[in-house]
Image (cartoon, rainbow, N blue to C red):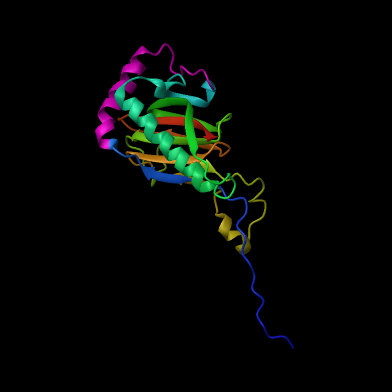
Amino acid sequence: MNNEFTPVEAIEAWTTPLYMTQLEDHEFLKDALLAHVYACREQQQTAVDSHVAVTAKHALFESELDFLESDVPEVMELRRQVEELIAEVAADVNQGHWPEDCEAYAHVIESWYHVTENGGYHDAHTHPNCSWCGIYYLDPGEADLGTRNGVNRFYDPRVNANHYADPGTAYLGETGFWDFSPKEGQVVIFPSYLKHSALPYFGQKDRVVIAFNCVIELD
């Protein structure tokens, strides 16, 4: 009789990578960025100047999709930092899939701000025509994870992962979503296919974020 133990190999397949970090120099950039956001908001002709999915958004101001193309020094610095972050993330995820000794560059192709007022929200959506996306919490206002106030919710992309529940599927979680606790100066980075939303926000102070979509180029 063979009493030797045959090891069982664990294979992690089809995982969804998300990244969180604190933006470098947030304290230095914050005031100028906020001032520029509100200056732009005052010039808006409509609440949603991007004219994208207008009915999915309520009680918020959204800029056109070129916010990080401004020549304001603090905006230019923010763009530099987020492109470096995205390039670093893409390199980490794609190790083993790129040619040796190549250099990766990230390019912001779309960027916008959200100034969300009391009662505002953004329904579930994805970001097409890019590979990596990010949300920078310039000022999360009174958003709070404990009460699910104004948090970003990310949804499980595995179709039918929750079609059956017993103790064997406990690892899938009970909800099918993950709520991100917004903290001032933090950046969350995620793949463009990942569906997410901004839950209803309630507070006297505005919730202000800057979002961006990126593509990757190898040299």
In this orientation, does residue 203 appear?
A: yes
Q: Residue at x 60, y 47 (%)?
A: 97
Give x and y (percent) for residue 145.
39, 45
- Left or right of 167 on screen, residue 28: left
Q: Nearer the viewer, residue 9 or 43?
A: 9
In which quadrant of the rendered view does residue 193 lie? top right
Residue most extreme to the bottom: 1
Q: Nearer the viewer, residue 130 or 146?
A: 130
Part of the protein shown in magenta: 27-52
Give x and y (percent) for residue 166.
63, 61
- Left or right of 40 on screen, residue 108: right
Give x and y (percent) for residue 173.
55, 54
In which quadrant of the rendered view does residue 38 lie? top left
- Location of the N terminus by quadrant is bottom right
Q: Residue at x 25, y 36 (%)?
A: 27
Residue most extreme to the front: 101
Q: Residue at x 34, y 39 (%)?
A: 23
Q: Does the magenta portion include 112? A: no
In this orientation, does residue 62 appear?
A: no
Q: Does the magenta portion include 38? A: yes
- Vertical placement of residue 149 versus 68, above or below: below
Residue most extreme to the right: 1
Give x and y (percent) for residue 88.
45, 43
